[in-house]
Every structure is written in C-alpha cells, then in structure tokens.
Image: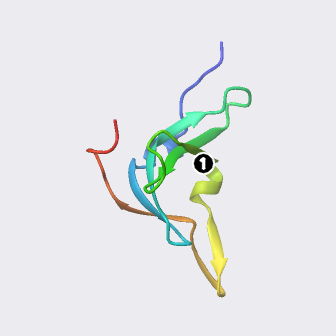
Amino acid sequence: MIDYKLSATAKRLKRGIYKHYKGQRVIVYGVANQSETLEEVVVYRHETDDPNHFWVRPLSMFLETVTVHNQTISRFTFLAENDKEIV
C-alpha cells in the first residue's frame, strides 16, 4: 500500500493569500498529490480569476526563490489567512 502522507514541508504551508513576486495575489487552498507521480503540488487560484479555475504548481517551485534585479526573493510571499474564502 502506498503512503499518501504529506511531507512536513507541505504540512507547514499556510492556506491563505500569497503575493507572487510579479505582483499578482493568489489564494492557496492546500497541497495535493499528483495522481501518477505523487508529487506534492500547491492548489491555488488567482484572486481575479473565475472562482472555479484552479492552478497547481509543484510545492518545491512554489517555495523556491527567484533572482530579480540581482536580488533573491521568494516566488510567493504569505500575506494573510483568508478563512472566509477557503472552504
């Protein structure tokens, strides 16, 4: 039997509102496993998108840093919890 438990890193990811380094705000719903590879992916949507349109991104990519104008910054930055939005 396959162990579907989330990693400690995935469990620490807060649900709520994040800001992408390019300025867009997203609502993170949680972490899921890709069905074939079991890779952990973050489930989110852009605040301005249709509420039924979701995106996924590998957890490792969601948490990584990027270099912009010779400065290393987080790809996504946590802003706030949003319990009203997240079901």
Task: Judge from the rendering whether residue 67 lies leftward or rightward of residue 55; answer left or right.
Answer: right
4 vs 56, nearest the viewer: 56
**Position of 43 relative to 79 (above/below):** above
For badge 1, the amino acid type reads Leu
- The extreme front residue here reads 50
- The extreme left residue here reads 84
Task: Judge from the rendering whether residue 66 lies leftward or rightward of residue 20; answer left or right.
Answer: right
Q: Residues within 10 Å of mark 1 (few under 14, many from 20)?
A: some
Q: Secondary structure at mark 1?
A: helix
**Position of 33 relative to 47 (above/below):** above
31 vs 22, nearest the viewer: 22
Give the image location of residue 24, x and y in percent. 49, 66
54 vs 65, nearest the viewer: 54
Quadrant housing residue 66? bottom right
Q: Residue at x 60, y 42 (%)?
A: 41
Give the image location of residue 5, x and y in percent. 54, 28
| Residue assigned mark 1 | 59
Give the image location of residue 31, x and y in percent. 52, 39
Q: Residue at x 73, y 31 (%)?
A: 37
Q: Which quadrant: the N terminus?
A: top right
Looking at the rendered structure, the number of numbered marks drawn on it comes to 1
Q: Which quadrant: the C terminus?
A: top left
**Position of 21 relative to 87 (above/below):** below
- The extreme right residue here reads 37
- The extreme top residue here reads 1
Task: Judge from the rendering whether residue 37 lies leftward or rightward of residue 30; answer left or right.
Answer: right
**Position of 39 relative to 69 (above/below):** above
Q: Residue at x 40, y 49 (%)?
A: 14
Q: Residue at x 57, y 58 (%)?
A: 63
Q: How is the image coloured?
A: rainbow
